Image (spheres, rainbow, N blue to C red):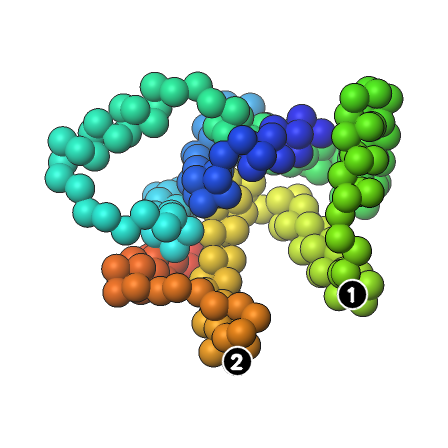
Amino acid sequence: MLTIIFWYKALHQSEATRVVPIVGVLTPIFTLLLSVIFLNENLSQKHFISFSVLMIGGALISVKQTKVYIFSSVINRARDLLGKVHVRYLPTQCFAAYYVLIKYIYSHEPFLGSFVWSRLGTFIGVLLILLVPSWRESIAEHQQNAEKKTNIYFFLGVRIIAAAAFIMLNWAISLGNVAMVNVLQGAQYLFLIIFVLILSAKFPSIYKEELGRGVILQKIAGVIFVSWGLYILIS
């Protein structure tokens, strides 16, 4: 529940283009550290190489920054990034803690029962949010001002796909190494690029993605790293 709160709080206070790459890159690292400490899950040499390559590929695909910096600038930017305690970094630790905790539960209890009880707990947590008067009023006000033009079939279709993806993610966590499953989510950016290119080509009036030369080269490099990481993993 805290994970979702910090996630949306970060998106509210900062740009999505900054939050999503940070969460996508740092969450697998924290997940790996926590899984080694609390679950005693160690990666083999091949899996660690695959983990690192996939993480780099996912970062290259998701990050929109394409400028090239000299070494001193990179150090200064990294120091500035790590020196700031901001709410947008909190989801990374929360996501990592959730993945490790749910993996621990799946390791000791049947998957179906564990999954249902975890979702029930989230549902109760959402209901508790409504007990705070200011939050309840804010939600009601937003709903009244929101435009109601969404196609109901489109909305239901998106919700069903999202639910199926979440169930499959949890099933994968219950079966494999939680850190590897987490970093493999970086492969979703590969499919995202494909979908974006198709939508941009077929429906330019509805969806148009601006891709400059630097962005294209960066995305291609990311695709190569993700493909390389997947090859190392399955070979």
Q: Which amino acid type is shown beneath numbered disc 1?
A: Asn
Whether residue 174 sits left or right of residue 228 in the image: it is: right
Q: Which amino acid type is shown beneath numbered disc 2?
A: Lys
Among the two numbered marks 1 and 2 on one chain, the one whose residue lies closer to the N terminus = 1
Q: Residue furthest front?
A: 145
The image shows residue 73 at horizontal and vertical percentages of 17, 33
The image shows residue 37 at horizontal and vertical percentages of 50, 23
| Quadrant housing the C terminus | bottom left
Of residues 139 and 45, the one drawn nearer to the viewer in this rendering: 139
Q: Secondary structure at mark 2?
A: helix
**Does residue 125 appear in the picture of this structure?**
no
Q: Secondary structure at mark 1?
A: loop
Of residues 165 and 138, the one drawn nearer to the viewer in this rendering: 138
Q: CA distance from mark 1 to mark 2?
A: 20 Å
Residue under label 1, please give it.
Answer: 151
Q: Residue at x 77, y 30 (%)?
A: 138
Tell me whether circle 1 and circle 2 mark residues in contact (CB < 8 Å): no
Residue under label 2, please give it.
Answer: 202
Q: Residues within 10 Å of mark 2 (few under 14, many from 20)?
A: few
Image height of 135 relative to 184, above or below? above
Image height of 203 relative to 214, above or below? below
Image height of 79 relative to 52, above or below? above
The image shows residue 200 at horizontal and vertical percentages of 48, 73
**Does residue 9 appear in the picture of this structure?**
yes
